Image (cartoon, grey):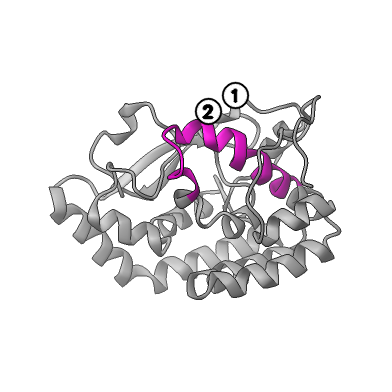
Amino acid sequence: MKRALDIAVSLMGLILAGPLLTIVAAAIWLHDFHSPFYIARRMARGGGTFPMMKFRTMVVDADRTGVNSTAAADRRITPIGRLVRAYKIDELAQFWNVLKGDMSLVGPRPQVKADAGLYTREERRLLTVRPGVTDLASIVFADEGEILGLSANPDLLYQQIVRPWKSRLALLYIDRQSLWLDIRLIGLTALAILSRAAALRRLERLVRQLEADPMVQRMAARREPLLPYPPPGALDVVTRYP
């Protein structure tokens, strides 16, 4: 049923969003006369990689700078790319990956090989399912660019602050996954585009219903500052919520 939902929704999404996708592709191409698409190698189910399609939101060859994490004020982002990112339009191209079977509509967000190489044994469970277009963390960390913009080293901040919590949310999804949960997360993702505050309130209730660890519940509400925390499966816990 999950695969049937993936095919039906992604196919309908590509058809309905076709005019918008065409306009966005043309705008990106007209900005610098380079391909509007960016093919990124991401970790696949089972530990291999697959070519993930996105609209290009950065200058050409931005990936050669060696920086994996992207802050909101990153100078590599083009003007049209900033608008595309704000409304998550760049992710719509991944419906194609869903149709191909590389991805699912809902699942842990696909990671670059360098980040996956840092996974603990527990985090490697994230590679046992298809990566997704959206998940719990996509809503909780919709402001990831702003968070990373607080540091001169966004990659380091990502590993210390963002990755541990995103991994916990992704593992929560894996442990509780169901067709009904997928439908709810698709709905919350759509709501987040209109009102992230409303989506977070509903997601907070959802995480509580999923009986997540109280620490994860507090973090998912995003009412408190994010604190450094070891990733799932790490031996030593050096920082805790008060």
Q: The N terminus is located in which quarter?
A: bottom right
Please name the amino acid that badge 2 sits on: Lys
- Please tell me the numbered disc located at residue 193: none
Please name the amino acid that badge 1 sits on: Gly
The structure residue drawn at horizontal position 60% and vertical position 75%, both measured from the top left corner, is 198
The structure residue drawn at horizontal position 23% and vertical position 55%, both measured from the top left corner, is 79
The location of residue 30, given as percent across then percent down, is 14, 56
In which image quadrant can residue 126 be found? Answer: top right
Q: Which residue is mark 2?
A: 113
Q: Which residue is mark 1?
A: 117
The location of residue 103, given as percent across then percent down, is 56, 48
Q: Residues at badges 2 and 1 in contact (C-beta under 8 Å)?
A: yes
The location of residue 106, given as percent across then percent down, is 63, 56
Q: Nearer the viewer, residue 213 or 180?
A: 213
The magenta span reads 147-171
Image: 33 above or below 239: below
Answer left or right for 197 relative to 84: right
